[in-house]
Amino acid sequence: MNTSVAVKIFEAGKSAGADFVEIYEEETRSSMLGLKSSQIESATAGTEYGIGIRLIYGTEVLYGFTSDDSEDALVKLVKTLAFGRIDKMGYTPVEFAPEKRVADYNVAAFKDPRVLGQAVKQDFLFRADQTARKISDKVVQVGASVTDSCSNITLMNSEGLNLSMNRARLRVNVTVTVSDGTERLTTHEAPGALGGYELLANYSPEALATDATERLLRMLSAGYIKGGQMPVVMGNGFGGVIFHEACGHPLETESVRRGASPFCGKLGEAIGQPCLTAIDDGTMEGVWGSLKFDDEGTPTQRTTLIENGILKTYMSDRVGAQEVGIARTGSARRESYKYAPVSRMRNTFIAPGKDTLDSMIASVDNGLYAARMAGGSVNPATGEFNFAVDEGYVIRGGKICEPVRGATLIGKGHEIMPRISMVGTDWEVAAGVCGASSGHVPVTVGQPSIKVDQILVGGR
């Protein structure tokens, strides 16, 4: 973005009475290579370019975007957004800070996907396929993919911000389907991180395929659980998806400022037991959901949301922080230039505690061990959730017993939080993608193993 063009955009916005004007210019190149039925099924690559312009009046947001980077088109976009608005105070010229350049990944180790091309991915895909098929003749399908993206972003605003950000991410996926001739089960493993093709060496396709296949084979022979209210021990890592969905979204100022959160007005109050601490951290080195600056140009931070059961703060963006009356936490995010940023999660997790998984299991007479969670749904306004258990086992007499399937966990996030009575030491995180009003963004969920004293388990 040429600074002289940026000045014209800011002048047009300020002359139309906007309190704040922002330019977000992005070029993203992404590619994917996918395997299915033991052969390469898809290969895609593309580049997307555009500019988004945001005008803020108080806490009212006007947003538009275009792929035409000419001065006339951009000034016209501003005037269209601000149609009918007049500034009565006059316009103060913008003084830009020196350009700041940052990269979210390890630049020294970076192997650029745009240079190396798709062929480097093939070995990973075929090794995953061959491994899964060798484990059992019940494996009827294997899918695998490697996806990467590299973004160059320029962010400028009427307060003088002049920031250039380079972002790169890589994610792998191994999906396995097994069948006993009557029923079919499918699961997947999908880790990801910040960087380029140097990350492929960190992931073993054999280990991912083996974990997925062996989990499916255990569940294929399992019976169905009988539902009801019961204690549940939830496994680490992706188990944190329930906290992300049922509590994370209601702790974003995007929900709080609209009054659409069960946590409105509860700062400083106990919403969980003293063993519960929850954090959203955008600064974790190399982790999938991390970034140096958010999509408004605010430095990211480690934000403690709940500390020893006490609600400490919310995740905020510029508008949300202003409306709710808290500091910005560097949580403004957007999928691309096509979206205005709002407060979103980054790496959100329940922090490690002091209990062991064995002690949690031993404390349950009759219950469920949800070793691994699958997908589900949630109503952010109420916190009501419904999540499937991908791998589950009956707990009987303080011991893990037979595997069961068909289990779902049903409840409300703000009601479940006070029932978390034990928090483990075996902390892990897992990569995911979160969809909301500003599009789909990469996020990380996580937790150690935890014990919920009572939750409704759906079954047969």
Image (tube, rainbow, N blue to C red):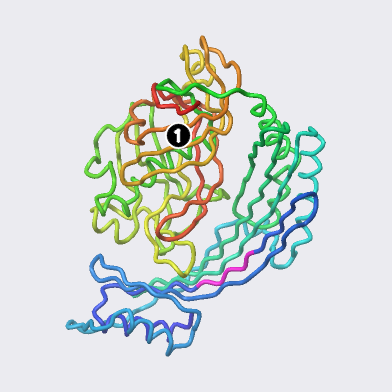
Q: Look at 63% across and 45% down and name the residue there.
A: 190
Q: Look at 55% across and 49% down and name the residue there.
A: 285
Give x and y (percent) for residue 405.
57, 28
The residue at the far left in this view is 88
Residue 18 vertical placement versus 109 (above, below): below
Give x and y (percent) for residue 99.
47, 73
> Foreground: 285 or 336?
336
Residue 148 painted magenta: no
Residues drawn in magenta = 26-30
Q: Look at 72% across and 31% down and name the residue there.
A: 180
How packed mark 1 is, by other alpha carbons closer than 10 Å (few <14, some 14-19, many 20 or more), is many
User: Looking at the image, can residue 97 be seen?
Assistant: no
The residue at the far top in this view is 397
User: Looking at the image, can residue 202 be seen?
Assistant: yes
Question: Which secondary structure dominates the residues rendered in magenta?
Answer: strand
> Foreground: 356 or 215?
215
Residue 387 vertical placement versus 426 (above, below): below
Residue 27 painted magenta: yes
Q: Residue 23: which quarter of the image? A: bottom left
> Foreground: 234 or 303?
234
Looking at the image, residue 296 sits to the left or right of residue 440; the answer is left
Q: Tell me the residue that label 1 is attached to.
A: 351
Give x and y (percent) for residue 213.
71, 35
Residue type, numbered disc 1: Ala
Looking at the image, residue 313 sits to the left or right of residue 150; the answer is left
As helix, strand or loop, the secondary structure at mark 1 comes to loop
Give x and y (percent) for residue 137.
80, 34
Residue 224 vertical placement versus 35 (above, below): above
